[in-house]
């Protein structure tokens, strides 16, 4: 059974005006879908269908130069699916509960966290991702290049912001800082991050 493109967790226009339906039609419908198609073509009859299958393929191919294409496509499927859930309509605001407590303890305040997370988004040279992760029980902000994923580094992702240009260029052009600020102020899904923390 082949991998399938995961559906968006909201309507294609649900993130407007911050991220338009036009952007999501390309980003989800073209870019994300291309990774699914590519991976299925590479794996053939060995393709799986579940998230567990996808994670296994990603972890098994990580660091193996002969399997770079398999890693890049499997990781990008996982990263993008996680990114869609890291946002929600009418997102932003402030986290609550254990997540809020941990953010305050680690970064000093939510504003300081936002400052550091935005800096990670802006500071990722070229294509990649900014993440809030748990490692060894501690919160960390990390950046990954291209398709790299915290799961293969022993980290548990809580949320991510995609900083490949195709994630924001139609709406923000070259203004990555504005995109990152909009993600934090109006899109971030703190409920999703809190649920991931509870499972970490």
Image (cartoon, grey):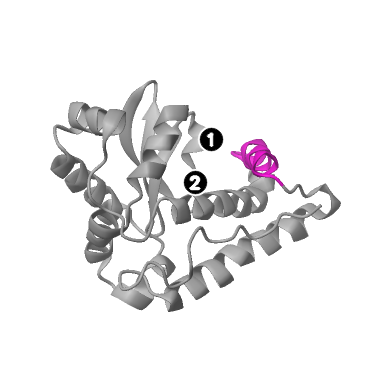
On the picture, is 13 further left or further right than 41?
left
The quadrant in which residue 108 appears is top left
> Does residue 200 appear in the picture of this structure?
no
Q: Residues within 10 Å of mark 2 (few under 14, many from 20)?
A: some
Span colored in magenta: 50-64
Q: With respect to residue 36, does 112 lie above or below?
A: above
Residue closest to the far top:
136
On the picture, is 45 further left or further right than 178?
right
Where's residue 80, x and y in %? 51, 55
Magenta span contains residue 131: no
On the picture, is 80 further left or further right than 69?
left
Residue on which disc 2 sits: 148
Residue at left offset 63%, top offset 40%: 55
Residue at left offset 37%, top offset 43%: 191
The disc at residue 75 is none
Where's residue 172, x and y in %? 29, 73
The quadrant in which residue 109 appears is top left
Q: CA distance from mark 1 to mark 2?
A: 8 Å
114 or 42, which lies in front?
A: 114
Tell me whether the residue at label 1 lies in contact with that at label 2, contact meaning CB atoms closer than 8 angstroms.
Answer: yes
- Predominant secondary structure in magenta? helix
Q: With respect to residue 12, does 182 lie above or below?
A: above
Residue on which disc 1 sits: 152
Where's residue 71, x and y in %? 62, 47
Secondary structure at badge 1 equals: helix
14 or 21, which lies in front?
A: 14
Secondary structure at badge 2 equals: loop
Residue closest to the far right:
45
The quadrant in which residue 157 appears is top left
Where's residue 162, x and y in %? 40, 56
């Amino acid at each position: 059974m082949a991998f399938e493109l995961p559906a968006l967790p909201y309507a294609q226009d649900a993130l407007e005006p911050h991220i338009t339906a036009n952007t999501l039609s390309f980003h989800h419908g073209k870019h994300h879908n291309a990774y699914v198609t590519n991976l299925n073509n590479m794996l053939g009859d060995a393709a799986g269908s579940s998230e567990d299958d996808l994670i296994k393929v990603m972890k098994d191919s990580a660091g193996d130069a002969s399997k770079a294409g398999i890693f890049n496509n499997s990781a990008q499927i996982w990263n993008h699916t996680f990114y869609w859930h890291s946002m929600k309509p009418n997102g932003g605001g402030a986290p609550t509960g254990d997540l809020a407590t941990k953010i305050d303890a680690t970064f000093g305040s939510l504003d300081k966290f936002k400052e550091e997370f935005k800096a990670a988004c802006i500071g990722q040279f070229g294509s990649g991702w900014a993440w809030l992760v748990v490692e060894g029980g501690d919160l960390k902000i990390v950046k990954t290049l291209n398709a790299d994923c915290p799961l293969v580094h022993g980290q548990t992702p809580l949320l991510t912001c995609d900083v490949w240009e195709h994630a924001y260029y139609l709406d923000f052009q070259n203004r990555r800082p504005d995109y990152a600020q909009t993600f934090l102020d109006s899109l971030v899904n703190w409920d999703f991050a809190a649920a991931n923390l509870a499972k970490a």
